Image: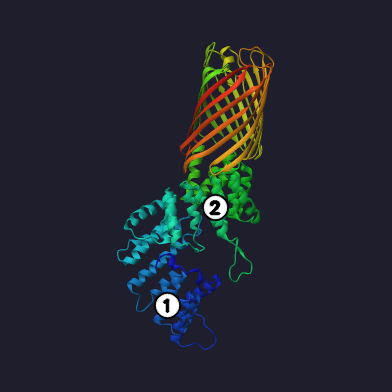
Amino acid sequence: MDLIHTTPPRSARVPRARLCLALIWALQGSVALASTPSPDRDALMAQVRAERAQGHRVDALATCQAILDRWPADREALSMNVTLLTELGATTRAKELAARLDPPQSVEDRFHLHADDVGHEIRWADGEPADLRTPYAEADRAVADARALAEDAGLPKDLRRRERFDLLVALDQAGQTAEAVKRYDATRKDDAPFPPYVERAMADALLAQRRPAEAAALFEDAIAKDPGPYDPSEPEPRIGLMYAYLESNQVPKAIKTIDELTAKEPAWVRVPGIRLPLENPRKVDADVAAATLREYVDMPAAAYARLEPLSREAPANAQLRSELGMTELARGWPRRAEEDIDIAGTLDERDVGIYVGRSEAARALHDYDEVDDDLAVAHAMADRNGRVDRSMRSWDRERGWQFDITTERGKGSSPDFGDRDGDTQATVASPLIDDHWRVLALARYATADLPEGSVRRSRVGLGLRGYARGLEAYVQALPAADRYVGKTAIEAGVNWAMSDHWSVNADFSTAGDDTPLRAQYYGISAKTLATAVTYRSSELFEAKLGLTRDHFSDGNQRTGWLATVVQRLHTAPYLTLDGGVEVGGSMNTQTERPYFNPRRDKSYALTGRLENVLSQFYERTWTQRVDVAVGRYDEQGFSSDWMATVRYGQIFAPMPGFRLGWGIGWHNQPYDGRREHRVVLDLTLHWGD
């Protein structure tokens, strides 16, 4: 008898009240069968056997108890009592009664009863823990008992194979997936078929061990052998299959699998004896999985469109509310996400995902004070949960050392950039100090080959960055290390996310690096102030207005502005297409300076961006991006003409917290009536999170 068969089929199940009543009869004493005269003993035993054969085990148990009331020493009735209790899941009581049989059970029967007891222990261990402080206590006991039985040399051959199967299931439930997969790999060399319940558990373990293609094949085989319906205590294997398809880059199959499941599951189910229909938990699980899948493949709007109406219909459903919060976080709404996740926490304090989600929303807001506490609670509740482990490692990377370097090399004929130019910036940030501060070390180096000669700008300095809820600010000093402009750049800035939709930022420098290198060559510097207001409804729409003010040391004052609007045009799994408009202009108070400074100029352009994932395997990703802008440029005193920019780039993330990027771009635009062009190669590297 395998693990699945220890539970009666659905058609044989009875209401819980009747089951409890029958078990009370068996555990605490006997109750008269009826006030009417009872049939003789043989007729009653025949009735017991018939009721058991029909799947009416509770009725059979009641009849069996009636026999034992009248004939307490009846060996057949006592043995049948043990059998019925075993089949109903009361194996602990069955073992107690079996020990009193005279003559005792055979060795094989005792092993079978012990195996049934372990099988039920494994099944019970899959529920919520009795003590949140020891979440795997029941599962670990089930593993220990299953291991002891599987390694018992006296176990009959047929039971030994079954117990090895049960041990695999117990290991998966206990989060010991590495051992489960190791034993599975060794066992499957026997070329013996695995029952579906073992295949489902091993597919789950393979998925946890990042072998998704094998997991998908095993899920498929298990579902083909046993398409369901499944016991309510068992997870729906098609959801596991969806994740296996997703992680093995079979996204269309993943979407098809979960959408078919959501369409098949009814929203409500009827239970005999209950007048009103009940919410179908399998339907909720399928709907949540379908939304989560879309969030994973960069379609958070589609995920939100599924979850938001469900949450409105069932506002007290903690699972829906929690997943809605995570989707809101993916859409760039951390405050709204916090609210929904907090509500979910009041509905179900046992949900580990709530504490993880709360920490991630706080991180998005730079509100780091309670991140450690939330993750500590999640870890205490489920220290073998992969999601908790990934979140903790991500937090360790974010609060640890950060390193960034960007460099670009250009070639062209621009009056500001020269025939060849380059710009490199490197930043090293210390780990978080008291959850609010980082110390920075910065270095910048820029060069250009101008017609007049070569010029460079070198700065090295230190800074301090601070964080508060929704706020990031910095101050830094970078002394000059070149002979052209011997000024120390004192810089400060702030970025304030006032709400989930509005943010403002400002940056000031006493010797800004936005000053053209051509001005640097002539010893001219500039104090710069840049401000911007951004409205972002979600990942689908953003509008931004920026203003700049430059005070050059030669007396010139430049005022510039730039307005951009970006709208999502198309979203597909791992692919987005954005379109937008960009309008800007500037005004200088002085002309005829050695750097490009028209009295007035303005431009407009239509922009587009295509971004998609070329390859992904868990945290290892490879993406590409194409940016295009085409428009017109108008400079006072010169005729208007077209301008264009095209860039192609890729980002490769071989491991969490490490990214490499490259891109090549081309820009063409008239300056003072002369058409100029520039080709740029840029490289980026990031370490941290």
Task: Give the farthest residue toward the top.
Answer: 452
For the point 58% across and 11% down, which residue is it?
522
Residue 452, percent from left and from top: 54, 10
Q: Between 348 and 625, which is closer to the camera in this rendering?
A: 625
Q: Nearer the viewer, residue 637 or 418?
A: 637
Q: Residue at x 44, y 56 (%)?
A: 220
Label 1 with label 2: CB-CB less than 8 Å: no
Instruction: Give x and y (percent) for residue 242.
Output: 50, 52
In what quadrant of the picture does the N terminus appear?
Answer: bottom left
Task: Name the mark nearer the viewer: 1 or 2.
Answer: 2
* Residue 336 seen in the figure: yes
Seen from the viewer's position, the closer of residues 232 and 114 is: 232
Badge number at residue 80 = 1
Q: Quadrant of residue 543?
A: top right
Circle 1 Cα neighbour tier, 10 Å, few/some/many (<14 / 14–19 / ≥20): some
Q: Is residue 561 visible?
A: no
Horizontally, residue 214 falls left or right of residue 189, namely right
Q: Would you name the residue on which mark 2 appears?
A: 289
Q: Is residue 144 above or below residue 518?
A: below
How far apart are the two marked residues, 1 and 2, measured between alpha carbons? 44 Å
35 lies above or below 400: below
**Residue 572 in the figure: left or right of residue 639:** left
Amino acid bearing label 1: Met
Q: Which mark is residue 434?
A: none
Looking at the image, which residue is at 50% across and 41% down?
394
User: Residue 178 at what x, y percent from top left?
Assistant: 39, 51
Report helix, strand or loop for mark 2: helix
Left or right for 313, reference 374: right
Task: Of the two numbered discs 1 and 2 on the same chain, state the one appearing first in sequence.
Answer: 1
